[in-house]
Amino acid sequence: MKKIILIVLSMIFAGPFTTTAQDDNAKKSNYIRSGFYLKLGPVFPVGLYAQLQTAPVTSTLKTTQYLTYQPAKIGAAIDLGYLIYIGPSFANNHLRAGIDVTFLNGWFNSTSSVGESDRWKHFYYNIGQKIGPVFTINPVDRLMIDISYKVNANLGIYYGEWDDFDPSQYSNYGIDFFRNEISMSLRYRVMVLSFQYNFGQISYNNLNTDRTKQSINADTFRLLLGFKF
């Protein structure tokens, strides 16, 4: 009888602590959480971006004249952003949906130079922001798979070697609001590895709608490594 009483008392006093421990474990199992990320890595040009391209120039002549854009070579990119999850996780905390906001996206690609002067001119420079939906899968432990689609707002800058043209005929910068990106990221704890396909055109008109818009295709594949906090 005494043994039974001792067992019952032990269960009564141990019960709350056991329940608390189980609750804590349940909370810890939900690892899909919002946070900042920083990614860096190479940018590989694909398609027409890796080839010679041409674009028309502003001209008073009856004949159409074209600028030649040098093929892009390997470059680099930086992404600084935040994953915002909306609502709770579901499927026993294995799935969660949210918004991927990259509030700083900077990238560049080098080109082959025609001359040896002004090396800084032989690069495609870009800076902008990206935003879109993200869907995260947590298959096991703290391994995360992020799948996202983002729309890009992008400021492009390029100074070519166009000595045969007057500077008033061509533009060196312009803004595009609807470039696109499809990406998949693998995360484990704070480490992140991202595979990104970024596609669309870059247009230059010096932010002047009266000028001829010079557009080139600028599709890239990016392999970025970084951290998510």
Image: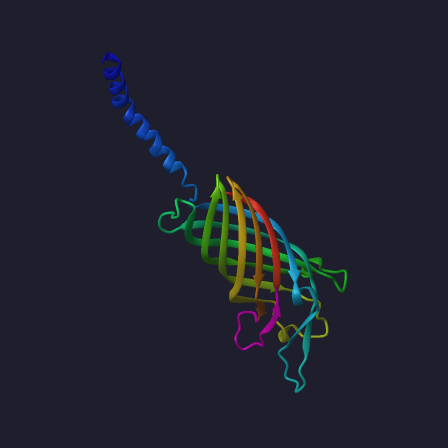
Q: Residue at x 26, y 14 (%)?
A: 3
Q: For this rendering, which residue is in front, 227 or 6?
A: 6
Q: Is residue 26 left or right of residue 54?
A: left
Q: For this rendering, which residue is in front, 100 or 143?
A: 143
Magenta-colored stretch includes residue 215: yes
Q: Residue at x 43, y 44 (%)?
A: 32
Question: Which coloring applies here?
Answer: rainbow
Figure label count: 0
Q: Is residue 136 left or right of residue 195?
A: left
Question: Which quadrant of the view contains residue 16?
Answer: top left
Vertical side of 185 occupied by 117: above or below: below
Q: Residue at x 28, y 26 (%)?
A: 15
Image coords of residue 99 (percent x, y): 43, 54
The quarter of the rendered structure image containing the N terminus is: top left
Read off the magenta span.
Answer: 205-218
Q: Residue furthest top?
A: 2
Image coords of residue 147 (percent x, y): 50, 54
Vertical side of 53 occupied by 20: above or below: above
Image coords of residue 163 (percent x, y): 72, 71
Vertical side of 16 occupied by 225: above or below: below
Q: For this rendering, which residue is in front, 69 or 142?
A: 142
Q: Residue furthest front?
A: 1
Image coords of residue 40 (percent x, y): 59, 48
Q: Name the magenta segment's main secondary structure.
A: loop
Question: Which quadrant of the view contains residue 125?
Answer: bottom right
Magenta-colored stretch includes residue 4: no
